[in-house]
Amino acid sequence: MHSAPSPVIVSPDQPVPAEFDLLCEGCGYSLIGLMVDRCPECGASFDATALPLARIPWLYRKRLGRASAYLQTLRFALFSPRRFATELCRPVRISEQDAHRFRMVTIAIASLGAALALAGFLQYVVGFWPPRLLSVGLLALCAGVWLMTFVFLRMATDLPTFIWRGLPGKSDDLSPLHEYAAAPLVLALPGAVLFVALVFVLTGLIVRGEQLTAEGTLVMVAIGLVPLLWAWLAALIFMRTATRCSFRRVAGLALYLPAHWLMMWLLVWLIIGAVAFYGAAVLEWLGF
């Protein structure tokens, strides 16, 4: 039983730590020093002349453990964004597929935060004890909020590659930066926990009756904006670091991102409205 490795944040100018040596992509076995083109552990073939994977913990989750690798990657992307982007721009393999998986996990966790905030608010409204949130209707409502938030974040972070047009490097080579720039969205989950705690601690200030007060609304909006603003800033830092583009180009992305998010939010509500309208029409036609 091996102990979990301590969190590691690497710098491009440092020697490669042992956690990030050449590994088999099938089983995570170290391939350093092998004179054959097959992994002795699982038998998978590999190209000894291929570029090594980037020193991003998420790419080594089979060795580090999924949870540990995810948390280390979050720490790296959140608190060292310039070094993170520089690492991805070295002559290494980035693995766009793995970057996409990282974004999907992050979005799922962030969406859970939205559902948790709603569940906590409803629990306060119906009474703190005994818990009465296990009804089918309320669970369905929370699930719907999770799905709506997931769809919105999925579309909002799926940025078109035209924003890289005319910049150094191919758009496909830079596209994983889109995926990892979603890392700050995970802060929605602790933000939701904080919001629920404030609802119960600041009784009467955040919620009055069954409605959020003006102060409560401001608190909710402020907590919700933190992940979005951090993701916005991360995208700008990633673009500037990866391409050394002009500040004018960065300013263009800074203006485009909020507009893109707003369009995706409106599109989600348009879809919800259409589903609700036609769903009600079908139910009426069926006699319900």
Image: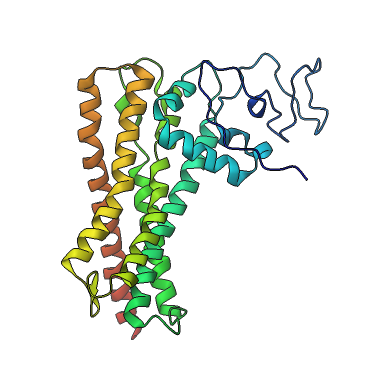
Can residue 143 be spotted in the picture? yes
Q: Residue at x 41, y 64 (%)?
A: 116
Q: Residue at x 31, y 45 (%)?
A: 228
Query: How many numbered circles are shown?
Result: 0
Q: How is the image coloured?
A: rainbow
* Residue at the extreme right: 40
Q: Quadrant of residue 132?
A: bottom left
Image position, residue 177 (x, y; %):
42, 30
Q: Is residue 94 left or right of residue 2?
A: left
Q: Quadrant of residue 123?
A: bottom left
Quadrant, the C terminus: bottom left
Relative to the observer, which residue lies in front, 261 or 244? 244
Quadrant, the N terminus: top right
Q: Residue at x 34, y 25 (%)?
A: 239
Image position, residue 102 (x, y; %):
50, 41
Relative to the observer, which residue lies in front, 214 or 252? 214
Can residue 172 be spotted in the picture? no
Image position, residue 272 (x, y; %):
30, 62
Q: Is residue 3 left or right of residue 127?
A: right
Q: Quadrant of residue 231?
A: top left
